[in-house]
Amino acid sequence: MNLCDYNTLKKILSKHGFTFSKALGQNFLVNPEVCPAMAESLNADDKTGVIEIGPGVGVLTRELCLRAGRVVAIELDKRLIPILGETLDEFDNVEVLNDDVMKLNLHQLIEEKFSSCNSVKICANLPYYITSPIIMMLLESRLPIDEIVVMVQKEAGERLCAEVGTREAGAVTAAVNYYADSEILFDVGRESFMPSPKVDSVVIRLAIRKENKYKVSNEKRLFTVVKCAFSQRRKTAANSISNTMGVSKDRIFEVFDSLGIDRNIRAEKLTMNDFISIAEEL
Ligand code: SAM
């Protein structure tokens, strides 16, 4: 079954009376090269478990089933469940869950579904409206996973994979950098989707580190400082942290001065080590 074939896809969708939901970020891949390339980049084998977020009609899911030992696909839209029943019918190594990935206990899911696997990976063409929250949730919950290979909007991908301390960086950049090594794998043009979105995409890989790269006594405080520093991008980091964390400006200046950090610096110029030192001092 070729789900990238326009007529095949249209036939299945209309048979089930399916209409796209913009609110759920439903842009389905129709470029036949993208899903095999994404699935291939996982280097999966029959001992690999893969969680897919938002399988849609199953175009990527099928490629994952061909390469991995076991696939669990989590789809929020219940209208897609009977379609997936049809498009994945030939595979016996896949399970589809009708659920919201943000509400599932993924630790429990991994324990229950992937006990026979040597490694677990996440692969998805992420719904754009919720890209950063999903990635933050996956990283912050410290799941026993090796890597995350996902398609995101180009601008989001550039931010996620930027270096902390550069113009492209945001709060999410620091979080990614804290937990993982990131890279952009390849570009995907907007014409690769049905319906076609207004922006291009990229596929990125986040390789989760087994060992901590940074020494931090309180992760929660670190990420509060990072989020507060970036929350008012037009202001200096000191102003932004002071306004949103409720710490006096004098105290922030005292910390910045003791660390040799310019009082007027903006959040995008702060390095990971700067953020860590500020969080430790505050
Ligand atoms: N994987 C398919 C593809 O590449 O053609 C569909 C990708 S589409 C960009 C995103 C999918 O995520 C949609 O099927 C949408 O219904 C689903 N989705 C949206 N929010 C979700 C959530 N919170 N949990 C699980 N799935 C979600």
Image: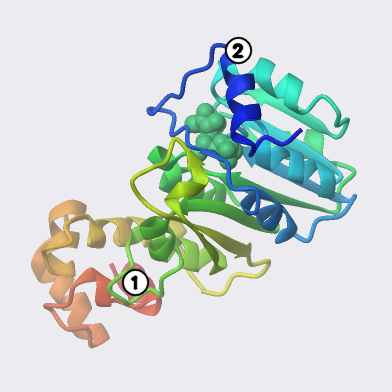
Camera-nearest residue between 59 and 52 = 59
For label 1, the SS is helix
Q: Position of residue 95 (x, y in %)?
A: 77, 28
Q: Position of residue 5 (x, y in %)?
A: 64, 36
Q: Is residue 10 left or right of residue 146?
A: left
Q: Amino acid at mark 2?
A: His
Q: Are marks 1 and 2 in contact (CB under 8 Å)?
A: no
Q: Is residue 36 left or right of residue 253?
A: right
The vertical placement of 89 against 61, above or below, is above
Q: Amino acid at mark 1?
A: Phe
**Circle nearer the viewer, 1 or 2:** 2
The vertical placement of 271 against 139, above or below, is below
Quadrant position of residue 50: top right
**How far apart are the two marked residues, 1 and 2, measured between alpha carbons?**
51 Å
At horizontal 68% and vertical 57% (from top left) the residue drawn is 37
The residue at the far bottom in this view is: 260
Q: Which residue is mark 1?
A: 275
Tell me if the residue at label 1 has its CB under 8 Å from ligand 1.
no
Q: Which mark is residue 16?
A: 2
Quadrant position of residue 170: bottom left
Q: Position of residue 235 (x, y in %)?
A: 11, 64
Chain-order first, disc 1 or disc 2: 2
